[in-house]
Image (cartoon, rainbow, N blue to C red):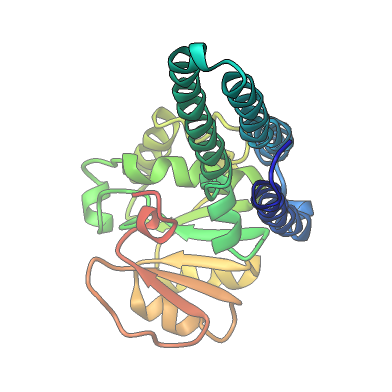
């Protein structure tokens, strides 16, 4: 029979385990509507882990009881004392090993779940449903309309983020160009990068204009929750009309308004790099 101290230790370990599990479940319930299949699977797996861990936590008590029975038998048989003591040592080692495995199981399953890129994007955009974004300096490597007359190159580092945005946001891309050939070059680059294959973005949502004021006008007409741009003047002009803005700049800039954020790149803002 287990001693009172061993029983109290087991109860405390089990109580601590369920308290941690309860806190985890409470956190998940508070975010119920944002759970995806992976999160639901994690909760189900965690429940299974609780049962498994509970059994492991019980095993040391069983080992102690078996050990005490063997010790009682050995005391009544002095001749077999050496043999019985040899059997007791592996039992203690197994008990310690069980404790270690149980603690490792608890630590592993209670590690913070790393959010997916999609979850980060939704959180960063504050569940915004419409986004407008400039191409030059944000999606494309080029930074001026003159460069687009020669080539258009999609930044591979932002492609994954861009596709995640299209999964739950109405996304519009826009840029100022100097000729029709530049438009064709941009659309071809986006198509070859696979931007149009996800179904969230179509070519009709890539808008072109001939002036910076034209781009600002596009944004105001669309009334997005977020606008992403690399031109500080456009950001400043739209600050009082758009709920949130993201200024992409390789240089550290001062925050011009409470609703304007800044980052060196789209990927770094969403923490994907």
Q: Is residue 202 left or right of residue 86?
A: right
Towards the viewer: 231 or 114 = 114
State which quadrant residue 166 falls in: top right
Towards the viewer: 259 or 202 = 259
Q: Position of residue 6 (x, y in %)?
A: 65, 46
Q: Position of residue 262 (x, y in %)?
A: 38, 72
Image height check: is 58 above or below 204? above
* Residue at (56, 86) in percent of width and height: 240
Q: Position of residue 254 (x, y in %)?
A: 32, 85
Image height check: is 91 above or below 114? above
* Residue at (57, 42) in percent of width and height: 106
Image height check: is 210 above or below 14? below
Count of numbered marks: 0
Towards the viewer: 223 or 244 = 244
Look at the image and tell me in which quarter the N terminus lies: top right
Is residue 154 among the parts visible in the rendering? no
Q: Position of residue 127 (x, y in %)?
A: 66, 61
């Amino acid at each position: 029979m287990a001693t009172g101290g061993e029983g109290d230790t087991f109860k405390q370990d089990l109580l601590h385990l369920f308290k941690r599990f309860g806190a985890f479940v409470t956190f998940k319930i508070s975010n119920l509507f944002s759970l995806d299949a992976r999160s639901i699977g994690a909760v189900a797996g965690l429940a299974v882990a609780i049962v498994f861990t509970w059994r492991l936590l019980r095993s040391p008590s069983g080992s102690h009881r078996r050990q005490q029975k063997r010790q009682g038998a050995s005391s009544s048989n002095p001749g077999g004392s050496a043999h019985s003591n040899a059997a007791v040592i592996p039992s203690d080692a197994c008990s310690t090993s069980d404790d270690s495995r149980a603690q490792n199981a608890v630590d592993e399953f209670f590690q913070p779940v790393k959010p997916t890129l999609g979850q980060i994007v939704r959180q960063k955009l504050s569940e915004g449903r419409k986004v407008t974004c400039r191409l030059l300096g944000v999606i494309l490597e080029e930074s001026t309309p003159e460069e687009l007359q020669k080539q258009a190159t999609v930044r591979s580092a932002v492609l994954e983020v861009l596709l995640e945005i299209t999964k739950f946001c109405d996304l519009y891309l826009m840029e100022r160009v100097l000729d029709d050939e530049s438009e064709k070059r941009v659309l071809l680059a986006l198509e070859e990068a696979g931007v149009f294959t996800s179904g969230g973005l179509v070519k009709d949502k890539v808008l072109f204009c001939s002036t910076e004021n034209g781009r600002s006008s596009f944004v105001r007409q669309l009334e997005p929750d977020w606008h992403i741009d690399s031109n500080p003047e456009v950001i400043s002009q739209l600050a009082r009309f758009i709920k949130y803005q993201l200024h992409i700049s390789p240089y550290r800039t001062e925050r011009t308004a409470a609703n304007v954020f800044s980052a060196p790149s789209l990927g770094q803002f969403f923490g994907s790099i």
